[in-house]
Structures are given as C-alpha cells and as structure tokens.
Image (tube, grey):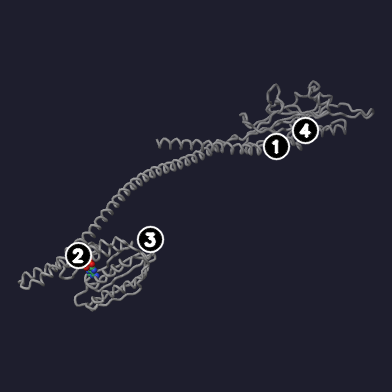
C-alpha cells in the first residue's frame, strides 16, 4: 500500500515537473523565435534595400536616355551611349528607343530582333505611363531567350519650340534581366546565411503568386516578408531559416535535458519518500519499544516497591528480633555468672563448659548488636551540614585506647564539611578506622592516613589509607556484604557486619564506597558522598 502511494506520488512529481519543463521550453523557444524573426527581418530588409537601390539604378538609364533626347531631339549615336550606360549601371539586358511608342532601336540588337516594330500603344501599362508621365515597370515575364526580366518604360515628352507645348515623343525602355540584377545584390548571400528566400509579386494575379526568384523549390515555412518598392511595382522578399524556426536539434536537446531533470527530481523525490516511510516505520517501532519498556519499567517499579516493602518488613523483623533476643541472652549471661559464683565445688570440666557458654552468649550479644545497628541504618535519617573533621576527631578519641595499644598513628587533613546524618557518619568513620587499626600486619604498628578532596561534580571524596595486611582483588565486593569475613575468629575478632553497615550508610547518603588493595600492601577505602544532599 505504502509502495503504491509512493509510486503515485513519484508519477505526479514526474508529470508535474515535465509539464513545467515543457512550458519553459515553449516559452524559451517562443522568445527565440521572436529574436530570430527580428534578425531575419533585419537581414531581409537590408537585402530588399539593396534590390531597390540596384533596380532604381538600372532603371535610371531610361531617364538618362530621355535627358539626352530632350537635349538633342534625336539619337544618332544610340548604340555607343547605350553600351556605355549598360556597362556603367549594370543589371541591364538591353536598352530600347520607341518613338511614337513603336520600338525602333534596341541595343544590343542580337537576339532582340523580334521586338523591333512592336507597337506599345496596345500595352495598357505603356498607355498608363503616358497618362501618368511616370516611369512604369512591367513584369516579371519570361524572356524568349530564357530568364525572367522586368521592363521599365519612361514616357518622353519633348517641348515644341514654337508653341512651347510638350508633346509625347515615345518611350525610353530598359529591359532588366533579374538573374543579373540579383547576382549584383548577392541575393544568394541569404543562402549562405542559412536562409531560404523567395522574391515574388506583392499583388496576386488571379489569386496566384508570381515568383520572381527563389532559393529552392520548397515553400517557405511561416516566413518573414519585407516589401521591395520599385516605381509602380511592389514585390515581396520573404525569408525563413533553413532549419525552421524551431530547430529540431535544439528541441531534442532541450527535451532530453528536461527529461533528465524530471527523472532526477522524481528519483530524489522517490528517495525522500522512501526515507520518510522508513523513518515513519522506525518511529512506530521505537514508540512500540518505548511502550514495551515503559510497561517493563512499571513492572520493575512494582517489583521494587514490593521488594522495598519486604525489606522494611525484614528490617523491622530483624530489629524486633534482636531486641527480643537480647533480653533472654542477658539473662543467660547473668545466671551463668551467678552459677559460677555460688557453686564453689564445681569440677574443672563443668566450670569450663559454663565459661564457654558464657563466651558464646557474649559473642551472640555482639552479633545481635551489629544486626540491630544494621537494621537501624534505614530509620530516622536526619541530614544536616556536619563539621566532618570534628566527628572524625571524636572517633579517634573513642579509639584512643586501641591506637595506643597497637602503637599505631592516625593522621588526617582536608576533611571537608558535608551534608549528612551526624550519627551515621560517626558510625561510618568508626567502622573504617577500627578496621584499619585491626587488620595491621603482625609486628608492624598501624599507620592510618585520612584525607579528603572536593570533586567538580559536587561530590566529596574521603580516603582511609592503611599499611595493613590488605586483601585480594577478588574480595573487593564480597567484603561489603553482611556477615562476610575473610579471616577466622581466632585471627581477628569480628562479625563481618562492619563494612555492610558502612555500605548501607553510604547508599542511604546517595554515595559510593570502593576499596583499592592488594595482599600485604595495605588498603585504601574510598568514600564518595555528595557535599549537598538532593532534596
Ligand atoms: P569484621 O571486621 O567484623 O570482620 P567487616 O565487615 O568490618 O567485618 O570486614 C569484613 C572483612 O573485610 C574483614 O573480615 C576483613 O577480612 C576485611 N577487611 C576489612 N577492613 C580491612 C582492612 N582495613 N584491611 C584488610 N582487610 C580488611
């Protein structure tokens, strides 16, 4: 389903971008066509002007002939003058004189003999020329001797010296072969500029266009056209690019580019959509995992609460039990003492039994006391800012007898103040210091060094260093468990509860206790406690 949706979205992206791309190509091509047409119009205009100029120049020979006639009233040296004019003005096939509108003289005569004697009064354009007294251009028409030509006829009016009137004399005519004329203006230059051209009559005769000249046989596609004005005639010069206004190559190239662009865009879209889909799936999975974990945490919390309740129950049981056990035990010891005092004649063995019973009871009393101490750690905790060094000094004072007995020394410095329960701190210092004194090497007086340090994370470190027997690395954790001892009773007295009580006190103070030691190398007990308790 998700894949289908992605496919649909990618298709929409492709179609949309392709549509936009095509529109951009269309806009670009339209603009380019406008530019191309403007350029083509410029080029066509310049060629049209050249044609106009050359045609006017060639036709002006009729005026030249007329001027000579007006000055001399006759033309004895027509051939030489005509030859000279044809040479000088160019584009002219022949020049003619037609007095009384009948062609009498032609230069060059060769090939033009059939025209001699032709009466121009039957020609409506010639008649129109007489009426308007204007140069009249006629054509284009096909020449008998091949080619296409136009004729320019100028009606000559001579003044009668006596009456002063102007009388029609006849025509001076120039026959202009267009191939020659167009060669002079280099109309073929358009082809080398990659244009097709066509020169035609602007006025359609019988709905048909008369083509004067063209670059090829094909019809021009949507050409630009400019007018060529020659006397009474109007021609059209039309041109269009050989490769068309929308060159195939450009279209294919631009289409290809748009296709590649749209393809890339769609691919990127596809990648993005896939990634989003993956992300969604991952999110869903993560949410499920979080929910699972939350449920597990809730279960753990319930367990922890139950465990805490059990612990409390156990502690209160231990506390009550130790209280209740102490009383009968005290009685056993007292009555044992009384028994020893009163029965003087007890044999040695019985006396020994009673004494061993007494010692066992005393040991049990110590056990029970330690157990009671352990269970009391959890209750009645009161934090306050304590003067740590003062508490340590009190502990040292309490242990004075043991220190001097062992010949040991205790040194301390940098004991920082912190927020804690003063009674539990005293208990902590007492246990650590008495252990440091107790576990000394035989024959080596204990040297205990206590010093503190403040940490960047708001904690306070206290080190209890001794030069005692040390312990193996594997016991580093075990010694903090209740009733865990590494020695027999005969070697070192104790119950194995001292460090368990320390650990419990420190945990209640949100701290940590660690030991660094190796056998025979002494031990360093490290206590880390917060300077300020979190409320
Ligand atoms: P106890 O001292 O009553 O045996 P503790 O809980 O205080 O019980 O200590 C547990 C064990 O850790 C001891 O039996 C002893 O083996 C070891 N221990 C404690 N303190 C030291 C110390 N400073 N140097 C070497 N061993 C120690």
Q: Earlier in the sequence, mark 2 or mark 3?
A: 2
**Badge 4 vs badge 3, beta-carbon distance below 8 Å:** no
Q: Quadrant of the C terminus?
A: bottom left
Judging by the rendered image, the residue that carries numbered circle 2 is: 367
Give the CA distance from mark 3 to mark 1: 96 Å
Give the CA distance from mark 2 to mark 4: 145 Å
Q: Is residue 472 visible?
A: no
Q: Toward the viewer: 109 or 168?
A: 168
Q: Earlier in the sequence, mark 4 or mark 1?
A: 1
Picture quadrant where residue 66 is located: top right
Alpha-carbon neighbours of circle 3 within 10 Å: few (<14), some, or many (≥20)?
Answer: few
Judging by the rendered image, the residue that carries numbered circle 4 is: 59
Q: Where is 484 relative to 446, above or below? A: above
Give the CA distance from mark 1 to mark 2: 125 Å
Q: Toward the viewer: 62 or 296?
A: 296
Q: Toward the viewer: 280 or 65?
A: 280
**Badge 3 vs badge 1, beta-carbon distance below 8 Å:** no
- Residue 33 pos. (x, y %): 62, 37
SS class of the residue under badge 2?
helix
Q: Earlier in the sequence, mark 4 or mark 3?
A: 4
**Which label sits in the foreground, 4 or 3?**
3
Report the residue that reaches farthest toward the front: 342
**Badge 1 vs badge 2, beta-carbon distance below 8 Å:** no
Q: Earlier in the sequence, mark 2 or mark 4?
A: 4
Q: Earlier in the sequence, mark 3 or mark 1?
A: 1
Residue found at x 69% / y 29% = 200
**Which label sits in the foreground, 3 or 1?**
3
**Which label sits in the foreground, 4 or 1?**
1
> Which of the labelled discs sits on residue 45, or is there none?
1
Give the CA distance from mark 4 to mark 3: 117 Å
**Badge 2 vs badge 3, beta-carbon distance below 8 Å:** no
- Residue 205 pos. (x, y %): 71, 23
């Amino acid at each position: 389903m998700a894949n289908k949706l992605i496919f649909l979205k990618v298709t929409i992206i492709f179609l949309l971008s392709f549509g936009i791309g095509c529109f951009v190509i269309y806009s670009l091509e339209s603009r380019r066509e406008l530019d191309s047409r403007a350029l083509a119009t410029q080029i066509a205009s310049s060629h049209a002007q050249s044609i106009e100029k050359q045609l006017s120049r060639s036709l002006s020979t009729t005026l030249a002939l007329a001027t000579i006639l007006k000055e001399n009233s006759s033309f004895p040296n027509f051939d030489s003058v005509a030859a000279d004019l044809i040479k000088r003005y160019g584009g002219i096939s022949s020049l003619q004189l037609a007095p009384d509108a009948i062609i009498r003289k032609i230069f060059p005569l060769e090939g033009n003999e059939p025209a001699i004697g032709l009466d121009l009064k039957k020609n409506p354009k010639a008649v129109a020329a007489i009426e308007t007294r204007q140069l009249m251009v006629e054509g284009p028409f096909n020449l008998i001797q091949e080619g296409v030509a136009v004729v320019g006829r100028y009606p000559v009016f001579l003044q009668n010296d006596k009456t002063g009137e102007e009388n029609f004399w006849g025509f001076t005519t120039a026959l202009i072969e267009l191939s020659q004329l167009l060669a002079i203006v280099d109309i073929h230059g358009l082809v080398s500029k990659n244009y097709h051209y066509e020169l035609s009559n602007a006025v359609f005769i019988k709905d048909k266009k008369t083509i004067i000249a063209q670059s090829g046989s094909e019809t021009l596609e949507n050409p630009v056209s400019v007018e060529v004005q020659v006397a009474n005639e109007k021609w059209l010069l039309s041109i269009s690019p050989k490769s068309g206004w929308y060159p195939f190559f450009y279209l294919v190239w631009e289409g290809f580019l748009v296709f590649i662009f749209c393809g890339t865009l769609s691919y990127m879209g596809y990648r993005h959509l896939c990634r989003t889909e993956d992300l969604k799936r991952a999110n869903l999975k993560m949410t499920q995992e979080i929910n699972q974990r939350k449920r597990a945490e809730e279960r753990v919390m319930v367990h922890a609460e139950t465990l805490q309740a059990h612990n409390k129950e156990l502690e209160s049981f231990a506390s009550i039990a130790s209280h209740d056990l102490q009383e009968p035990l005290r009685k056993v010891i007292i009555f044992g003492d009384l028994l020893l005092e009163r029965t003087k004649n007890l044999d040695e063995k019985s006396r020994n039994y009673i004494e061993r019973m007494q010692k066992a009871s005393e040991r049990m009393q110590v056990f029970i006391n330690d157990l009671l101490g352990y269970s009391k750690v959890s209750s009645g905790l009161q934090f306050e800012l304590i003067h740590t060094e003062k508490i340590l000094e009190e502990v040292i004072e309490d242990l004075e007898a043991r220190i001097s007995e062992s010949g040991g020394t205790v040194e301390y410095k940098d004991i920082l103040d912190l927020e804690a329960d003063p009674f539990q701190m005293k208990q902590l210092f007492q246990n650590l210091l008495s252990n440091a004194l107790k576990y000394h090497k035989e024959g080596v007086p204990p040297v205990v060094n206590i010093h503190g340090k403040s940490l960047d994370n708001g904690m306070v470190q206290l080190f209890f260093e001794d030069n005692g027997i040390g312990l193996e690395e594997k016991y580093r954790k075990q010694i903090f468990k209740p009733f865990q001892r590494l020695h027999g009773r005969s070697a070192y007295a104790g119950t194995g509860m001292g460090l368990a009580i320390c650990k419990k006190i420190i945990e209640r103070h949100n701290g940590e206790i660690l030991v660094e030691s190796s056998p025979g190398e002494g031990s360093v007990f490290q206590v880390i406690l917060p300077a300020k308790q979190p409320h």
